Image: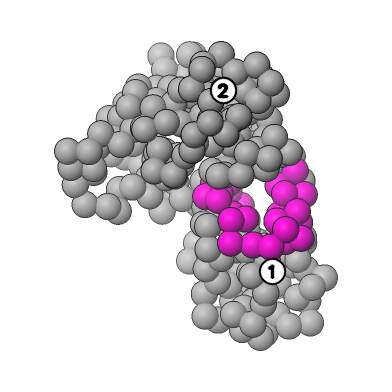
Amino acid sequence: MEEKTVNQQTKIHVEHLNLHYGTNHALKDVNMDISEHKITAFIGPSGCGKSTFLKTLNRMNDLIPNVKIDGTVLLDGEDIYSPKVDTTLLRKKIGMVFQQPNPFPMSVYDNIAYGPRIHGIRSKVKLDEIVEKSLRDAAIFDEVKDRLKKSALGLSGGQQQRLCIARALAVEPEVLLMDEPTSALDPISTLKIEELMEELKHKYTVAIVTHNMQQATRIADYTAFFLVGEMIEFGTTEQIFSMPKDQRTEDYITGRFG
């Protein structure tokens, strides 16, 4: 049985994952275990497949025409690519935060309440609770508590990104995928989001794509290095950055290319 092969601490198990966009072989035989309650970072030069890989974990690539995916992705031992899987429920379990903050053009409150409402929560008391808890968990409640009814588009970039994290948390995911969540932000906002991620891993499993290697060394427990669609090396962040086993990893992290 598949479930026996999955280590107890593994949240997502990826085996022989290949992805083609038409004739382009974008991910080549990727194998990885993503550990529960840890931060796993994906690093590598632009266009190497890190974001594509991240999106295979909650089936966002399904939305792109001419994509062919084969291999196995198990979430808690269940195959997420099984035809029986409801992708709406899957994306509730595996939330996503994108590179550019993308709040909806509505109030701060409605941004957060949006997901829970879609999933059938109507009670104002319950929604109030979820909104406050999600904003607190995203470390932004105190900054926005007096403007919950105002447009989220009036917030600063860093606040908008924390709002988007709160929005992802509002549907109570188990995993949070983050695609370069700080690349559009200033250093102070970046630091706040990094501190926030350190907190979030106690409740969630976090996977992050980052082009910032210092960020990976600061926050990630594990790091995977991707190059032209292949996962070249995967290990603890300390091992990857201090004793890489592959010359290509060493060349990348020492700045010889990328």
Which residue is at the far bottom? 150
Q: Residue at x 30, y 36 (%)?
A: 26
Identify the residue shown where x is 44% and y is 26%.
Answer: 231
Q: Which mark is residue 34?
A: none
Q: Secondary structure at mark 1?
A: helix
Quarter residue 164 falls in:
bottom right
Which residue appears at 68% of the width and 66% of the height?
158
In the image as oriented, which residue stretches furthest toward the right?
142
Give the magenta-colored segment's residue range.
171-198
Report which quarter residue 146 is drawn in. Answer: bottom right
Question: Compared with residue 196, is residue 111 higher up or lower down, i.e. above or below?
Answer: below
Q: Which residue is mark 2?
A: 250
Name the residue beneath numbered marker 1. Answer: 159
Discs 1/2, front: 2
Q: Amino acid at mark 1?
A: Gln
Q: Is residue 86 visible?
A: no
Magenta span includes 225: no
Question: Which image quadrant for residue 181?
Answer: bottom right
User: What residue is shown at x 52% (from left), y 80% (from top)?
Assistant: 105
